[in-house]
Amino acid sequence: MGGFDIDNKSESFGHVIWICGLSGAGKSSVAKRLRAILEQLGKPCILLDGDQLREILNVNSFATATIDRDSRLTLALRYSALCKLLANQGHIVIIATISMFKEIYSWNKQNLPGYFQVFLNTPVNILQERDSKGIYGRLSRGEIKNVAGLDLAVDIPTDSHLTITYDPSLSIDEVAKKIRNKLFTEKKFVGIDD
């Protein structure tokens, strides 16, 4: 995958925390809570959200549910490049995005400083019940197509640093704390006491 040649040789203390999962898995909520937790520990973060990024990049949110795999892959690579740019400047970047393609996982692992991948593994039936954006309902009514994980194939990550399988007893705060604990264990961040 080419197209982005952001300085690979930059010395950086930045990190990218890549939170992926299907639509409705709770990525944005978990990312916001994780940012708050890390900032309370003196670790300022930049939060990037796939929904907001699509708006900024002028990719309509509803149209995104109809774009094909190649278009989604290109968009995901842009997200990766942006994360790299920010992390190379020493920032901790938290991104909440679907972007579930093996090409992206591979590119991220090879190119993103301090890369830490989290997969929120939520069953499709739970996602369909939540359906806060109406995507799954619109798919079932035939109004849209290419919904990631249903009629558009995605690559379920098998080697994330942390996979959190849906558990209705876990709150957003508890999920974010699981990520924090694993992140500090894996990356040996300092400043965590509890």
Image (cartoon, rainbow, N blue to C red):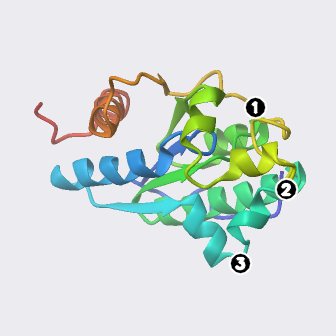
x%, y% of residue 19?
51, 43
Mark 2 or mark 1: whose residue is earlier in sequence: 2
Q: Amino acid at mark 1?
A: Asp
What label does residue 187 carry, if any? none
| Horizontal side, residue 111 vs residue 26: left or right | right
Q: Which residue is mark 2?
A: 143
Q: Kindly identify the residue that appears in the image at 84 percent across and 57 percent down.
A: 66
Q: Which residue is mark 3?
A: 58
* 20 shown above or below 134: above
Front-lying residue, 42 or 7: 42
What is the C-alpha distance between the residues marked 2 and 1?
A: 24 Å
Q: Kindly identify the residue that appears in the image at 73 percent across and 72 percent down.
A: 59
Q: Which residue is mark 1?
A: 155
x%, y% of residue 132?
55, 51
**Which of labels 2 and 3 is toward the front?**
2
> Secondary structure beneath disc 2?
loop
> Secondary structure beneath disc 1?
loop
**Residue 4 seen in the figure:** no
